[in-house]
C-alpha cells in the first residue's frame, strides 16, 4: 500500500478568517482616523469662497495653494518659536530623566522607592491646578535672578522640563532595570566610577529609550496650549498652537486658512512619528521585556 503524504502548509502561509477580520478592522480604523486629515488638506487647498459644509468633500477646482500660503506666512515665526521651545525642553528633560532613571534603578539607597513614588505623583497633577503657583514662581525667578522667565520661551522651556521629569524618569528607570547589573559591576572592577559608567556604558545603550522619550516629549510639548497661553502673552513670541487658535478671526473665519494652518502645525509631529516609529516600538519593547 502506498502511503499518501500531504504536505503541511507552513504556519506563515496560512490564512484564516481571523486574519481577514483583523485586516478589515485595521482598514476601517485607518479610514476613520485619516478622514479628518483628508478634510483638512482638501479644504486647505481651496479658495475661501469654495469652503462650506455642502462642498466639504469636493476636490479643489485648481491647485493654487489655497490657504496654505497664507497659513504659512502667518504661522512661520510661531513655528520657529515652538522649535526654540521644544528642542531644548525635550533634550534637557530626556537627559534629566536618564540620570534619574540610572540612579533609581541601579543604586538603592534609603528612601529611593519613596522618592520615585513621589516623583510619579506628577502624572496625576492636572495642568489647571498648578497654573497660579507656576506663574508666581516664574515671576519670583524674574525678580531674584534678573532673567526673564515669565513671559518668555525660556520660562516655557523650564516648565516643560520640570513637568516632563516624571514620565522621562519612569521610562528610563524601566529601561535601565533590564540592563544586567553584572555589566556595571565589571566596569567598577575595572576602575570606572559612577559617572564614567553612565556616560560610557549606559548612555550608548539608551538610544531606544531616548527615541521613546524624544517622541513622547516632543509631541506633548509641541501640542501644549494652556502653558503657552498662560506664560507668554506676546503674540509674536507665542508657540504655534496659540497662533493657530488666533487664525480664526472674531467676526469672520477663512476656513481654508484655518484648515491649512492645522495641517502645517501638525506636520512636525507627524514627520517625527513617520521617521522614528520603528525605533519608538523597539524602545517600548526594550523597556518592557526583561533582558
Image: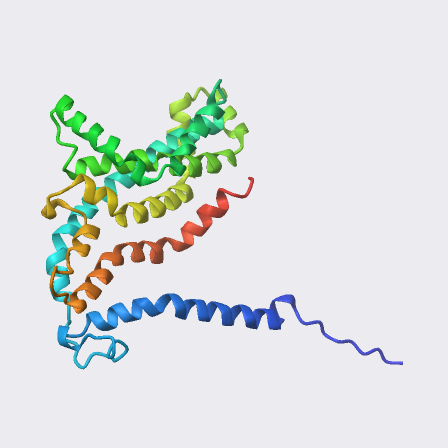
Q: Is residue 144 left or right of residue 88?
A: left
Residue extending farthest right: 1
- The front one of 137 and 71 is 137
Residue 209 seen in this snapshot: yes
| Residue 219 position within the rendered picture, expressed as x and y whole percent measured from the top left | 31, 49
Residue 216: x percent and y percent? 36, 46
* Residue 187 visible, this angle: no
Could you tell me which residue is drawn at 29 percent across and 54 percent down? 269
Task: Give the residue displayed 41% in from the left and 20% down from the top.
Answer: 193
Residue occupying the point 23% across, 37% down: 157
Q: In the rendered image of this protein, does residue 268 appear above or below residue 57?
A: above
Judge whether 58 appears above or below 104 on screen. Answer: below
Q: Position of residue 108 (x, y in %)?
A: 50, 22
> 99 or 23, which is in the foreground?
23
* Foreground pick, 105 / 254: 254
Q: How is the image coloured?
A: rainbow
Quadrant that contains the N terminus = bottom right
Q: Given the current orientation, which residue lies at the most extreme front position?
A: 251
Q: Quadrant of residue 156?
A: top left
Amino acid at each position: 500500500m502506498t502511503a499518501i503524504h500531504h504536505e503541511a502548509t507552513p504556519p506563515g502561509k496560512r490564512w484564516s478568517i481571523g486574519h481577514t477580520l483583523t485586516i478589515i478592522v485595521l482598514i476601517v480604523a485607518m479610514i476613520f482616523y485619516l478622514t479628518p486629515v483628508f478634510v483638512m488638506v482638501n479644504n486647505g487647498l481651496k479658495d475661501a469662497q469654495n469652503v462650506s459644509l455642502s462642498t466639504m468633500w469636493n476636490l479643489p477646482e485648481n491647485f493654487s495653494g489655497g490657504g496654505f500660503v497664507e497659513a504659512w506666512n502667518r504661522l512661520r515665526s510661531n513655528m520657529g518659536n515652538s522649535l526654540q521651545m521644544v528642542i531644548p525642553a525635550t533634550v534637557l528633560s530626556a537627559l534629566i530623566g536618564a540620570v534619574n532613571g540610572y540612579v533609581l534603578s541601579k543604586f538603592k539607597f534609603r528612601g529611593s522607592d519613596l522618592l520615585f513614588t513621589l516623583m510619579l505623583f506628577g502624572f496625576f497633577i492636572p495642568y489647571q491646578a498648578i497654573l497660579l503657583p507656576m506663574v508666581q514662581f516664574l515671576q519670583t525667578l524674574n525678580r531674584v535672578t534678573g532673567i526673564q522667565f515669565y513671559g518668555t520661551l525660556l520660562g516655557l522651556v523650564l516648565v516643560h522640563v520640570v513637568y516632563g521629569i516624571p514620565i522621562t524618569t519612569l521610562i528610563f528607570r524601566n529601561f535601565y532595570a533590564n540592563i544586567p547589573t553584572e555589566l556595571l559591576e565589571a566596569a567598577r572592577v575595572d576602575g570606572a566610577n559612577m559617572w564614567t559608567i553612565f556616560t560610557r556604558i549606559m548612555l550608548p545603550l539608551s538610544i531606544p529609550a531616548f527615541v521613546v522619550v524624544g517622541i513622547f516629549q516632543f509631541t506633548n510639548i509641541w501640542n501644549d496650549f494652556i502653558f503657552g497661553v498662560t506664560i507668554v502673552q506676546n503674540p509674536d513670541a507665542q508657540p504655534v498652537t496659540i497662533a493657530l487658535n488666533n487664525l480664526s478671526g472674531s467676526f469672520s473665519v477663512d476656513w481654508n486658512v484655518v484648515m491649512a494652518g492645522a495641517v502645517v502645525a501638525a506636520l512636525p509631529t507627524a514627520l517625527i512619528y513617520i521617521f522614528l516609529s520603528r525605533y519608538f516600538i523597539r524602545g517600548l519593547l526594550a523597556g518592557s521585556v526583561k533582558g
